[in-house]
Image (spheres, rainbow, N blue to C red):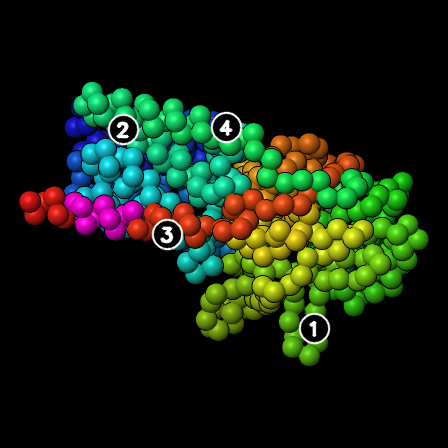
Amino acid sequence: MIGWSRGRRGDLAASVSGLLLPMAFAPLQWWPLAPLCLGVLFLCWQTDDARQAARKGFLFGAGLFLAGTYWLYHSIHVLGKAPLALALLLMLGLVAIMGLYHAMLGYLVVRGGLQRGPLGWLVGLPFAWILMEWWRGWFLTGFPWLSLGYSQTDTWLGALAPVLGVYGISLAVAVVSGGMLAMLLGQRRQKILGVAVIVVLWSSAAMLGRVQWTTDEGDRLSVTIVQAAIPQEQKWLPEMLAPTQDLYVSMTDGHWDSDLVIWPEAAIPALIDQVDGYLVALRKRMLEQGNTLLLGIIDFEPDSGAYRNTLLSLGPKVELYYKRRLVPFGEFFPVPEFVRRWMRLRNLPYTDFEAGRDDQSPLLVNGIKVAPSICYEVAYGTEQRLFLPAAALLVNVSNDAWFGDTIAPHQHLQIARMRAMEARRYLLRATNNGISAVIGSRGELLEVSRQFVPAVIGASVQPLSGETLYVRFGNWPLLATGLVTLIGLLLYRRTWRAR
């Protein structure tokens, strides 16, 4: 039955399933592909030795990230103006690195005999998968994009988010893949077990969806999100500064009485000191209303020479939030000095931003604490936990213009939805050219902007208090359980073989 998974046919199956897997995520959201594609990879590993499993794991992972992050080429070459060869090198380098994570997974699970039988299908492979996902999302700053759990934002499995976070949902998807493997390869009792596990898992998740993890805190807030849709090619031109300032003010006219007004990441393309008078005027306007404006801008510290990606709060109190998770090759360049000299000669960006500290406090809006995040750092659920449960509202500002008209803005929005689901808080998302959104506490899209056009979103949101299990404990219970389970399974396999 599984002879087709050997040799070149197996390599082809692993490659194709990896290439198809991104369709399970936004914008297509063909979520059944997630357990199906992963199940194909698990099936391929059943007859492999460790080296063959590593090769197929690499092909699967490389296919997944080639199809799922092709937009890096657009960001680096088309908009970033990096040479074609460099853009391809960086994009394919990331694809290869992600492929190596999956190759390591395949090698280790087959070497340890964790892939076979009911225990392997339903326990060994799923726990090994989520440990690998967590590792690639953490190691050397990590790249948590395309974790399987994100594909399930609109299914019953999404209700696991406030309990186990996105990696817990990834585990559930992998267990479903293992259950399908049991139905395909197992004997009668094993087939029944596979069906039962899938049914119990989905039923339990559906019941969890009824749990109210948070309660209302204070009055509802009126919110206005402004999306100016200034093309990235024009955004930083010196002659665009004054028109940009005027545009944001004119688009906000009629909405200054909102409790909270949000402009996106680097909305004002200048340093804080360069537009000090403009910012003072904005704050005066907000003070007249007794409300708060959050806007993205760049801060520069002359003494240290540090540039910081900043979210500035203008209200009764002036506050600054500095971005903590920086984008490699976008906001900092992990390259030696001789490469920097070459970048200077080529007139390429070469100056690093400096990351903000982890112990920053939530921002204050009308007496409500707000958990801020800037762009890519919304992909790190554990970073958000640092502000919780104190924060009653989540805010994310981003500049998704770097992605162009690709699948990336849709993937980014889906990731933001998961953060709302994990914390059971509303999340307000302001982007330069879309997709801006008001996201409900269950990840539902309440208001959504169109891309590439100016837009103003108005909404009323409810601050929420309370602590989900994920907010309280994070990923550690799941990771510890996975590690202990795999060690126990390895010891059991070794003892069984000895007997």
Q: Which residue in the protein does label 4 denote? A: 207
Q: Are marks 2 and 1 in contact (CB under 8 Å)?
A: no
Say which amino acid is labelled 4.
Met
Report if the CB atoms under discs 3 and 1 are less than 8 Å apart: no
Which label sits in the foreground, 1 or 4? 4
The percent position of residue 36, horizontal first and vertical second, equals 36, 28
How far is disc 1 from disc 4 in space, using C-alphas?
Answer: 51 Å
Range covered by the magenta-colored residues: 485-493
Between 326 and 125, the residue placed more toward the observer is: 125
Q: Earlier in the sequence, mark 2 or mark 1?
A: 2
Q: Secondary structure at mark 4?
A: helix
Q: Is residue 489 magenta?
A: yes
Q: Amino acid at mark 3?
A: Ala
- The residue tagged 1 is 301
Foreground pick, 356 / 245: 356
Circle 4 crowding by C-alpha within 10 Å: few under 14, some 14–19, many from 20: few
